[in-house]
Amino acid sequence: MTTVSRRAASIGPTPVRGALPGILAGPIIPTMLRLALPTIIVLVVQTLVGVAETYFISFLGTDALAGVTLVFPILMLMQMMANGGIGGGVSSAVARAIGAGRNADADGMVWHAIVLACALGLLFTAAAILCSPILYRSMGGAGPTLTAALIYSGVVFAGSIPIWITALLSSALRGAGNVTVPALVVLSSAAILLPLSPVLIFGWGPFPRLGVAGGGAAVVIYYVVATLTFIFYLRSPRSPLRLKITPLRGHLFKEILGVGFLSAVGAVQVNLTVIFVTAAVGHFGADAIAGYGIASRLDYIQIPLLFGLGTAVVTMVGINIGAGQIVRARHIAWIGAILAFGVTELIGLAALVFPHIWIGLFSDDPQVLAMGTTYLRNVAPVYGAVGLGLVLYFASQGAKHVLLPVLAGTARMIIAAFLGWSAVNWFGSSLSVLFHIVALAAVVYGALTAAAVLNSWGRRSANKPLAQTGFTPDGEDGAVGHLPEAEDQ
């Protein structure tokens, strides 16, 4: 047995500690895929359920579809802030605590995550009530389209708290190396949502026809079920992390928000970009909004892949950083980024060649098809740059160095959102020009994020004295070494 294996075994028998040898030593790609695949599979299912809901709503007409399209970027803003933003901070903090043997801190972060989820969920509910009419009008919503957007938004954002709790608790478990339970919870909840959505939208038996409100209600029920399941599991002896009410401690909030706050800013930037681009597209009418909404859903289809791979990278990088294995952490980051680039670029090239296959699933309206095809032929070829940048962003979360990747997202927002919106509204540019600007922003984002990783934690952290982490290396590259003693308090 290696030194790492012996020391990891001495920390405790739970699944978290048992996972440490595979993360701290051995081949990187098999371990990364073992952590990523369950999350990817379940998020593919979850995303397909969302696509199915869009399909059901499309039967209500173009106005309903356009109304839900207006709400979608705002909902994605909250979900990305919860999963990739504050949730990334939770995963990173838990992983680094486990890597350093601070097991009591890892457990305490679960309760602190729930407190944050409740506060942020209430904030989003209040913001949706107060700001939705102004926001959706500014994005081009009017008449029946605006009515559909307000109905769907009001129902969905009433369930903000369970959406946040589900995201942060699943992030805590993934940070601990437990990817199976989050996958099973989401799959089980999705099995409820898939049949429930058309029943509530169209009505069936004792259920009334609720229209777009039914789609929103199904989403809320889905997250309530997931939240309750996570709470029951984390209270059980089988859980690698323990959920219990503890005194709130500032240093645990700081551990989470030190990464999570900047990551949430990054999520805001991504979604502000989508909101401004949607507003610019809205200048061309409801058909353009519907076509863009359908085509851009392919962007979000890739999120399961990138999020699954990214959360695996967060866990692996965070635990290795906590244990002082800086060089191995850097290798993990670049291997994950190369995998993401390859797969997303293949998806983009397929969409470039066969755009009608995707768009035709949702609409046969010639104008909608034309608008969606314009988007895919301009933006899909640079999907690889976005994949590369996002996984390196996740790696930076694990390393607790997210400032420069967030600034790369700022550059993307300035180019795609502000310049793109200005080109349409001030200079009368066409949709094709707008989408060329969006593509340029994606390339700049990927390049700047790669440069940020190369010139921040990737270089300087490699020269950091490992004694500062409590880790004593056995080898020159830090692949095998001694973990610090567990600090159950």
Image (tube, rainbow, N blue to C red):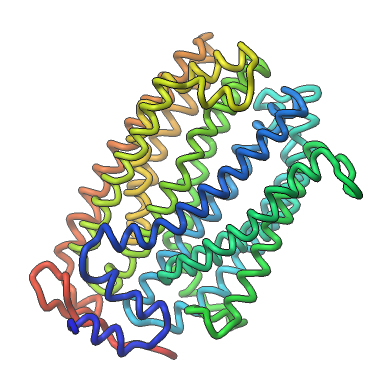
**Position of 143 relative to 44 (above/below):** above
Q: Check the image and report above or below for 25 versus 447.
A: below
In the rendered structure, the answer to whether residue 200 lies left or right of residue 312 reads: right
User: Residue 163, position in %: x, y?
Assistant: 64, 56
Identify the residue at image location x=52%, y=68%. 181
Residue at (50, 10) in percent of width and height: 429
Above-or-below relation of 344 to 471 = above
Q: Quadrant of the N terminus?
A: bottom left
- Placement of 340 over or under 384, stated as above or below: below
Q: Position of residue 116 (x, y in %)?
A: 59, 65
Outermost residue, left direction? 476
Question: In the image, residue 93 lies at what x, y percent?
Answer: 42, 68
> Would you say 71 lies left or right of 210 here?
left
Q: Who's the residue at 65% across and 58% down the image? A: 189
Q: Residue at x 29, y 39 (%)?
A: 342
Q: Nearer the viewer, residue 317 or 237?
A: 237
**Quadrant for the C terminus in the image:** bottom left
Number of dots carrying numbers: 0
Give residue 50's position: percent from left, percent from top: 62, 42
In this orientation, does residue 126 appear?
no
| Residue 432 appearing in the image | yes
